[in-house]
Structure formats: structure tokens, C-alpha cells
Image (spheres, grey):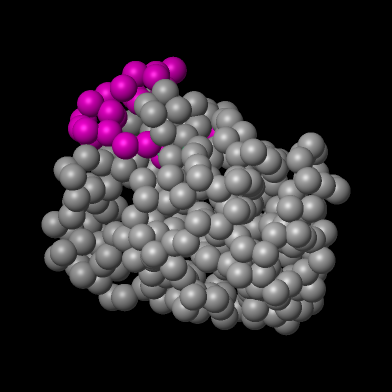
Amino acid sequence: MRYEAKDWDAVVEVLRNATEITVACHVNPDGDALGSLLGATLGLRSLGKRVQPTFNDTAPVLPFGYSFLPGGDGLVAPGDLVDAPVFLALDCGARDRLGALVEPVAMRAGTLINIDHHPGNEDFGHLNVVVTTASSTAELVTRLLVDAGVELDRDIATCLYTGIVTDTGSFQYSNSTSETLRIAAELLDLGVDKTEIARSVYETAPFGYLQLVALVLSRARLFPEERFIYSFVKLEDLRQTSVPMEETDKLIELIRATRDADVAAIFKEQEDGRFRASMRSKGPVSVGKIARERGGGGHELAAGFTVDSIEESVAGIVAELEP
Ligand code: 5GP
Ligand code: MN
């Protein structure tokens, strides 16, 4: 065991002995959630276990940039899950991140295993491997699978590498450690095509996405004193540009690129009229704290929450960031 996690060996033991396992990641999954989910699924299947991978409240479909991930064809809709004695929750900072349909299935499992790297994770599993110094859940899953006896192959490694590369901003963010790079190197040695992954994840946007970027950037508002920038996406924008909501994850990376702000937010309108906020910080401000105060969660430097009004939320954040 290379990580500080008291349940590590117990989790390895359960994974070794289980014959039926449900594996789930958080709703609206990102690269780490999907890579961990499919990497764990393929890895556990290679040990002869029956695995049901699932996520979201509707039929789980891989977002456009992740459709290349191996194993995505075997996803099970939450409504079709059969109860299994072991449930693996991946990259879920809190239990409710599993979503309304998957969470009750997790609660009924004999052994609920929580594998995550979000600070503020309250060990909601019977067994918990929560390592906040890990770059990604995929990094933890890599080591757990190997300890459980999985022989990693190219497909498994492709999933896990994708999780690591996306959660570290291609190894740029502070969460990327020498251990992260060692693990990534081991995965590359299994034949992972890192150029193909980068192209799939970062360079397959439809033309309408560029129009959406133009809209979002043109609306960005900077608060120079507070070093805060934000913008927003309306459902109407998505209709106009034919961009699905799953493709809007990287807009925040564009907003945060200015040197004139340390904290960035993007608000995305939901079907229910509320707004999902994604926040990023370059430090020292903890957007994780800002998100938790508003009923959301996340890391110190990347977090999210949901609000009724953009204006009210911005006013609150600006007040909090006042120098
Ligand atoms: P993103 O802005 O990419 O959606 O999320 C950034 C980080 O915050 C991710 O690690 C994500 O899991 C976490 N996060 C986003 N929204 C929420 C939320 O509503 N609750 C919790 N607990 N975590 C969130
Ligand atoms: Mn993650």
C-alpha cells in the first residue's frame, strides 16, 4: 500500500473475493469518473467477476469526447440494475453524487466501497479509500486493481490513463505528483495511445462548440479587484449551437485562462431552471469551501454547486472574495 488509507487491504480482499459487483461513478461523469468506472469494470471482469457498470439517472451514454473508451458498450441503465452484494462507488465526493436512482442500490449492498479523492468525503461507505493527495480516482483504481490481482492490459490502461490525464489537466495541475507520473508511465508502457486520447478528448468538438465558446467568452465578466471572472451558458445557447450539455465541461478552462483572475466560475442552466456552477481557483482561495457553503462540494481548486440565481450567487461570491 502506497497510500494512507486504513481500509486499503480490506477493499483489496473484498474485490478479490467478490463474484458480483456493481460499479458506479458520479452523475454527469467527467474523464476521471468514466475512466475509473470502465477501467475498474474491465479489470474486475478480467478476474472472472460479473460486473454491472452504471451512472446517471437516465440511460448511461458516454459523452462525445469519451466514446472511444473501451468497455462503454456494456453500461447498465440504473433502472435495470440487479442487486449485487458488493457496490463500488468511484469518484463520488458524497453519497448523493451517485444520483437519485443509483444511490438506493448502493445503500442496499452488503458492502459499499467508497473510492475517491475529494476532500470533504465523509467516508460514506462500509469501506473507504479516500486519498485526497491522489491526483484522480483513476490513480487509486490502478493500484487497487493491481493489488487485487488484475493484470492490466491496454484497454484497462487506456481507461485509467484517460482518468488521470483529464483530472490533472494533462499533468499541469498541482494535484499531479511524481507518483502520478510514475503510474501514467506504467500505463503508457502497456500500449496506451496518448496522442489518440488527447485528440479524442480535446480536439473532437463539433463546429457549433466554437460558436458556443464565442458566446460564453463574449459574456465573461471580470471583477478585477476580487480577481474573479464568470460567465454562463443558457439552454437556448445549446439549442442554437447544437452542443449537448455533456460537451460544456471544458468551457471553464477557457474562462480561467486569464491572468487577471484567480477564481473562475461558469453557470450552466439546467432543465429545472436552476444553474449548476463550476468553479476553479489558482489558489489560495478554496472554491471547495465556497461550494460546500452552498450545498455542493469538490476540491480546494475545483468544485461545483447548484443555485437558483446567477446574480445572487455572483454577488455572494464577490462579497466573499472582496480584498
Ligand atoms: P466540475 O466543475 O468539473 O463539475 O466539478 C469540479 C469538482 O467538484 C469535481 O471533482 C466534482 O466531482 C466536484 N463537484 C462538482 N459539483 C459538485 C456537487 O454538487 N457536490 C459535490 N459534492 N461535488 C461536486
Ligand atoms: Mn476525480
Farthest residue to the right: give it: 1
Q: Is residue 169 above or below residue 190?
A: above
Q: Is residue 252 visible?
A: no
Q: Is residue 288 above or below residue 70?
A: above
Magenta stretch containing residue 199, yes or no?
no
> Residue 64: percent from the left, percent from the top?
39, 72
Residue at the spot 41% in from the left edge and 33% down from the top edge: 296
Residue at the spot 44% in from the left edge and 62% down from the top edge: 81
Residue at the spot 53% in from the left edge and 40% down from the top edge: 93
Q: Quadrant of the C terminus?
A: top left
Q: In the visual, does 239 lie left or right of 209?
A: left
> Residue 303: percent from the left, percent from the top?
47, 39
The picture quadrant where one finds residue 197 is: bottom right
Residue nearest the observer in this picture, 147 or 143: 147
Magenta stretch containing residue 310, yes or no?
yes
Q: Is residue 268 visible?
A: yes
Q: In the visual, does 253 lie left or right of 307?
A: right
Residue at the spot 77% in from the left edge and 69% down from the top edge: 150
> Residue 299: percent from the left, percent from the top?
55, 38
Q: What's drawn in magenta, residue-wise?
A: 300-323
Q: In the visual, does 149 lie left or right of 171?
A: right
Q: Is residue 131 above or below residue 101?
A: above
Residue nearest the observer in this picture, 73 or 83: 83
